[in-house]
Image (cartoon, coloured by chain):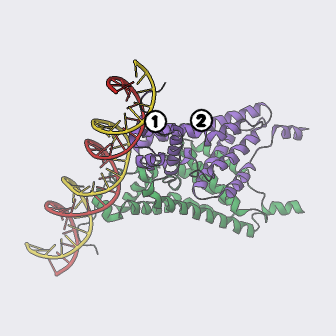
Chain colours: A purple, B green, C yellow, D red
DNA sequence: TAGGTATTGTACTCGTCAGTACAGAACTTT
DNA sequence: AAAGTTCTGTACTGACGAGTACAATACCTA
């Protein structure tokens, strides 16, 4: 039951706009003027609805995870580790090169190195990356358990390898590489894929 | 023959200190107070010796290329493409994880996404990355010409793949990965390496 | 030893930054 | 219609950003 003057903007749309500004300019590079202008609201509305800049960023990051970043969970749900890896790379590339987006990956390029004021944001993003890595590793371990990956495969290393390529692709995208070029990189990357558990059994016979 | 009051600091040492501040905090995150403090000089001395912040950064970048970044040229001088790639990855990792350094790679993490004021720095770094990529590609093409890489190998793709892994390793390092973990990633990455020209000939017989 | 020159340190300018006070506006409830 | 509540817009605050003016200092040359 709402009372008082109703809000004149859509918070989701505004948050979306803020997310894109952070994505494009980084945390430190995005000024409140940039943000309010893109969001189509003025400062007090922003502060009332989202708290301060840091709090706004965290909300934008959350929205990113549920929007552009959701390919991660979709990928991990694939039936095999190999498909998961393919989906991580190619799905990631789709996000990196989506023409409606600022390009690159918010989680990678927003605050890799920063001043004191953004330090807590940097750490937050490190945590996000670490958590994602962990999820990938767990997915691969499950695959190994299921015989989908060979017994001897180093899941931690493989997961970190895939994550590394994803992050590298993000830098490539930020450097102007186009979708086709990124896909070729993904193709190369997948050539390192280990023989599967079933192939291994095949060989044993 | 110098006249006037002599400079009381070593410009090279000061530039080195500035480089590390930029490396650690990024271009936008490094304030002039940070810089002058680390360099052990005061503002007018900085401006007299290095120009403005942007000019100082470009000089620091140059110093980076001739110092920590020099492994690139060393790697490309290796006799085979495979050795070059190994040296790019493992040599890069040494820089990324050098305990005396801020960690990660200056060229990757300094201004991936930034505000308007740092835009020209961002573009400069894109150019640096693109140029490096080009050098790697040229090295691989030479290898293909020499039969060191098989005739059909896509040198542009392979070069971009190696560069991508390097950039990804830089993000990993900035996220806290240690040297051993990065080396394991490099190992995985090299499993995608194509069969050599000579192996190919071997097979043909 | 006197004059010229370049560096140093302090203290400043001016713009931009994040964050906020306050008055007016718009809606609900009574 | 009046009171209560929440949002909007303007204009502000204080801190910090890059860049600089200027006097004092230290060296070289003459």
Question: Which one is in front, A94 or B7?
Answer: A94
Q: Quadrant of the C terminus of chain B?
A: bottom right
User: Residue B125: x, y in percent?
Assistant: 51, 60
User: Residue A205: x, y in percent?
Assistant: 92, 38
Observer able to see residue B103:
no
Q: Are marks 2 and 1 in contact (CB under 8 Å)?
A: no
In this rendering, position of residue A18 left or right of residue B200: left
Neighbours of disc 2 within 10 Å: few (<14), some (14-19), many (20+)? few
Question: Which one is in front, B60 or B187?
Answer: B60
User: Residue D12: x, y in percent?
Assistant: 26, 44
Residue tagged 2? A131
In this rendering, position of residue D23 left or right of residue B83: left
Q: Who's the residue at 61% across and 40% down the image?
A: A67
In this rendering, position of residue A56 left or right of residue B132: left
Label 2: element kind: helix
Label 1: element kind: loop
Q: Quadrant of the N terminus of chain B?
A: bottom left
Q: Residue furthest right?
A: A205
Label located before the other in sequence (2 or 1): 1
How far apart in space, not on screen, are marks 2 and 1 (Cα)?
36 Å
Is residue C11 positioned above or below A199 on the image? below
Question: Residue A84 falls in which quadrant of the image?
Answer: top right
Q: Which mark is residue A139?
A: none
* Number of marks in the rendered image: 2
Is residue A54 positioned above or below D28 on the image? above
Please give the chain letter of the residue carrying mark 2: A
Neighbours of disc 1 within 10 Å: few (<14), some (14-19), many (20+)? few
Is residue A35 positioned above or below C4 on the image? above
Question: Which one is in front, A37 or B87?
Answer: A37
Residue tagged 1? A7
Please give the chain letter of the residue carrying mark 1: A
User: Residue A36: x, y in percent?
Assistant: 44, 46
């Amino acid at each position: 039951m709402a009372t008082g003057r109703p809000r004149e903007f859509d918070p989701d749309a505004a948050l979306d706009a803020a997310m894109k500004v952070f994505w494009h300019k980084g945390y430190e590079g995005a000024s409140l003027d940039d943000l309010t202008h893109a969001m189509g609201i003025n400062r007090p509305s922003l502060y009332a609805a989202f708290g301060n800049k840091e709090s706004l960023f965290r909300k934008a990051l959350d929205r990113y995870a549920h929007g552009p970043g959701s390919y991660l969970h979709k990928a991990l749900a694939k039936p095999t580790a190999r498909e998961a890896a393919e989906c991580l790379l190619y799905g990631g590339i789709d996000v990196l090169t989506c023409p409606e987006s600022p390009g690159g990956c918010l989680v990678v390029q927003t605050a890799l190195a920063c001043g004191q004021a953004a330090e807590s944001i940097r750490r937050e993003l490190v945590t996000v990356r670490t958590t994602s890595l962990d999820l990938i590793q767990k997915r691969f371990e499950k695959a190994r358990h299921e015989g989908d990956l060979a017994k001897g495969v180093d899941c931690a290393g493989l997961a970190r390898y895939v994550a590394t390529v994803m992050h590298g692709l993000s830098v490539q995208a930020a450097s102007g590489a186009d979708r086709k070029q990124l896909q070729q990189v993904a193709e190369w990357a997948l050539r390192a894929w280990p023989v599967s558990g079933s192939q291994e059994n095949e060989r044993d016979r």
